Amino acid sequence: MTLIVLLAVPLVGALVLWRASGSRATVLHGLTSAFTLAAALGVAVQVNRGGPLAAVDGLLRADALSAWMIALISVVAALAATEAPAYLRPDAPGRFYPLFHLFVFTMLLAVSTDDVGLMWVAIEGTTLASVFLVNFERTRSSLEASYKYLLICSVGIAVAFLGTVLVYFAGIQQFGDEAHALRWTTVVRLAPGLAPRVIELAFVFLVVGYGTKAGLAPMHTWLPDAHSEAPAPVSALMSGVLLSVGVYAVLRFKPVVDLAAGPEFARRILLALGLVSIAVAAAFLWTSTNYKRTLAYSSVEHIGLVCLGLGFGGVWGTAGALLHIANHALAKSVLFVLSGRIRKAYGSTEISAVSGLMGPMPFTGGGFLAAMLALLGLPPFGLFVSEVMIFAAGFTQGFPFIAAVGLILFVIAFAGLLRTTHAILYGAPSSRHPVVEAGGWPRAIPLAGALALLLLTGLAWPPGLAATLDRVAAIVTR
Amino acid sequence: MTTVSNLLAFFGLVVTLLIVWRQSWPARRRLFVAQSLLLAALASAVGLFAHRRALLLVAAVVVVVKAWVIPRVLSRIGAGAPVRPIAPGRSSGMSVLVAGALVVVAYVIMLPVTAAAELPTEGAIPLAFAIALIGLFLCVTGRDALGHILGFLVFENGIFGLAILATYGLPGIVEAGVFLDVLVIVLIMEAVVVEVRREHDSIEVDRLRELRG
């Protein structure tokens, strides 16, 4: 029941907001966001206390992995939602709020259905809902970004459809017309008997398809454009959770291929894509001259790290990867929200135009620094812990060479990002004079909350987090 | 059944190769309509043979969406575009050669599937996949937005044909999602292309080069 409520709230909110305008829209937007968050946390608590939830004849199903993603999506969506009213002029053109909630709805649907076909429909829906959000500012470059985004992700998702069809085909070839052959629970149950070569081929298509959505190199080319052109709250959602939804889809098929064809196949693909992603990101982190694009390439790097963790496997690798998804989502969404404020003050996204930001904008700069230190993986923030878990898994699971290469690339990326951060915050003051920053606690509270959560995952795991991660990891490691 | 599905898939492939061959936009659009009608024929043939009434409905939807609505949108998008690309492109002979090679590639990639299949339609599966690959090739090498969209649609037709041949129809909710998806993508593309044209006075991709690095 709570699952239905969870999906109904953003959907109904989007429909109502379609006709609302002015301050009424802002209030409705706030209510929708708050109720979505409440319902999502309700689902997460219920699943963690009482096991998987199901609704609509099992079509909707939330296990520990879904609950983890639902909680994450709703928290990042709430953070982005608090920033949206300040970002938009009251008379802003287009339909920002309804599309925003539709976007959140499609992501929530993707992670809370048991039907891999419906999951595919929902993930395609994320593209359709967000493409107009990317082009929200209607400039030449945002138009180009949304065109690339739509085209590349549509092709990618069609490849994922092919993979889904092949999984279905393997199921009905082996076991006849199983009524629920597209249900994930059924597919995993039947997996040991499925034709291994077909499942391997299907997994390749699924990784390429959903990997496009996840921003894995070399399918990442849409990502820096879309992330840098979208309004800040949308960038936060895309980078924080949309990419993770792509990873989630791959993750759902990993146990299937592991059971059908042995664990080596998926492992090799994930490790290779992970290393390539980190390498590509490291190169661009050194050359990018635009700070929003720098943040976008950093997302490619972190999704690569997550893939490494999943490839290394074991409880540490998998749990580390899942924790890293959450940590990255929190840190990156704070950074995107702040980058939106910086952009608003300076009117530019070039690093050279905003350098020496700490002088005129100490509050924004301070927040940026804190979130960036978290993103770089320094203690006491949570990314340090999850990165240690991922690389430790590499060394203990018997992949010291790959882990070492990953670590070297990681350090290169780290240095590139640190250099950019230094230039932005402490570089020679730019000739532009920013608009005086709007201070005030109300705007700082959501960001401080996200950073506090990162401190929790870094310093003192709240009771139950370890058990939750174990449960989530158990779902995908077979 | 084997003969019918092989024949329809083969005609589909021939039409696809003609799309690669022809340069004139209205001709390519008409060929796409022909391909969609072949897809509908395939869906109804498999539906009659395997007693899947749902597939007859699918065939009807294919006719409406892919042979009528989408071509209309395509001709709206193409209105004002020159009949042939202005820039003298590669000779289409080369493209057809690549497309021919892709057919071989498709057979190789689909080997595990045809090996596992015990269906009368299995012979046509690599042909459908070849159509998809050629569509992808068209999409990647397309010089303007029209080329991209057409390539994507051909790609999608190939995958949909493969789905019908391999599984005799997917659950209704997924198929509904697929149709809705293609339709919305084409409509959004239209909106985007209209804006691109307003901004750039052209829909050639070469003008879209602002975002780099």
Image: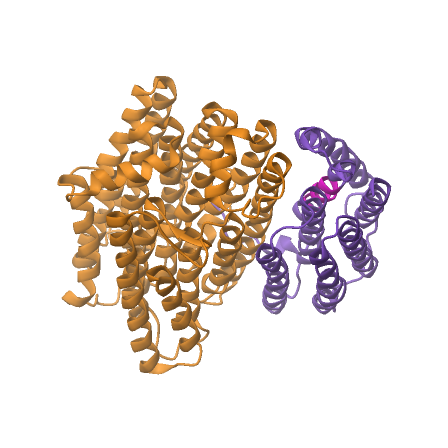
Snapshot quadrant of residue A432: bottom left
- Residue A339 in sight: no
Colour purple maps to chain: B
* Viewer-nearest residue: A305 or B116: B116
Residue at image position (79%, 51%) is B42
Up-down: is A265 above or below B121?
Answer: above
* Viewer-nearest residue: A456 or A341: A456
In the rendered image, residue B141, in percent from the top left (x then y), is placed at: 69, 45
Up-down: is A403 above or below B198?
Answer: above
- Residue A288 in sight: yes
Instruction: Specify the principal SS of the magenta part.
Output: helix
Q: Quadrant of the N terminus of chain A?
A: bottom left
Viewed as shown, does residue B197 lie left or right of A125? right
Snapshot quadrant of residue B26: bottom right
* Viewer-nearest residue: B55 or B188: B55
Q: How many labels does the image show?
A: 0
Residue at image position (51%, 33%) is A191
In the rendered image, residue A335, in percent from the top left (x then y), is placed at: 28, 52
In the rendered image, residue A230, in percent from the top left (x then y), is placed at: 42, 60
Chain A, colour shown = orange
Up-down: is A60 above or below A199?
Answer: below
Q: What stretch is highlighted in magenta?
A: B128-137
Membership of A347 in magenta stretch: no
Here the colouring is: by chain
In the rendered image, residue B65, in percent from the top left (x then y), is placed at: 70, 64
Membership of B135 in magenta stretch: yes
Q: In which quarter of the image is the C terminus of chain A?
A: top left
